[in-house]
Amino acid sequence: MAKTVDTQHKNNPGAAAVLSFIFSGLGQLYNGQIFKGLWIIFFAAVSILIFTAGAILVGFAFMGKRVFPAQILFGTALLLVSLAAICILGIYSIVDAYQSAQKK
């Protein structure tokens, strides 16, 4: 007897949401949305790199290094903008992964 493979299994919405909570885009990959998941992972990684750059610029001032006031302002701006991007992207990823898994 030949076995049939079920290609339309229903994804667990909770698992998709938890995966996206762990790292943005993993829930989309779990749901089979490879292209969308990779783009979200790319933007999350870029946001984390920008956040790190801002933290380094601001950190120099706290370590007593000689920095220009513009560096502190630029570093603070990088920190705030990238933190907002990380939060917005993370929430979007969790909600989208959950809703996409429910639709399947």
Image: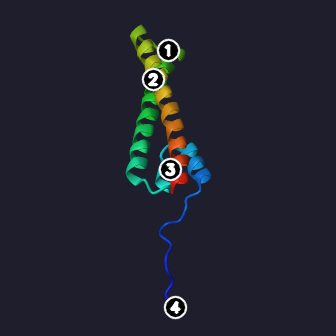
Q: Position of residue 72 (x, y in %)?
A: 45, 13
Q: Nearer the viewer, mark 4 or mark 2?
A: 4
**Up-down: is 30 above or below 77?**
below
Q: Position of residue 90 (x, y in %)?
A: 52, 37
Q: To which residue does mark 1 refer?
A: 61
Which circle's residue, 4 or 1, is located before the other in the chain? 4
Between the C-alphas of marks 3 and 4, the distance is 35 Å
Between the C-alphas of marks 4 and 2, the distance is 59 Å
Which circle's residue, 2 or 1, is located before the other in the chain? 1
Q: Secondary structure at mark 1?
A: helix
Q: Position of residue 10 (x, y in %)?
A: 55, 61
Between the C-alphas of marks 2 and 1, the distance is 19 Å
Q: Nearer the viewer, residue 61 or 85?
A: 85
Which circle's residue, 1 or 3, is located before the other in the chain? 1
Q: Nearer the viewer, mark 4 or mark 1?
A: 4
Amino acid type assigned to the residue bearing label 1 in the image: Ala
Q: To which residue does mark 4 refer?
A: 1
Q: To which residue does mark 3 refer?
A: 100
Amino acid type assigned to the residue bearing label 2 in the image: Val
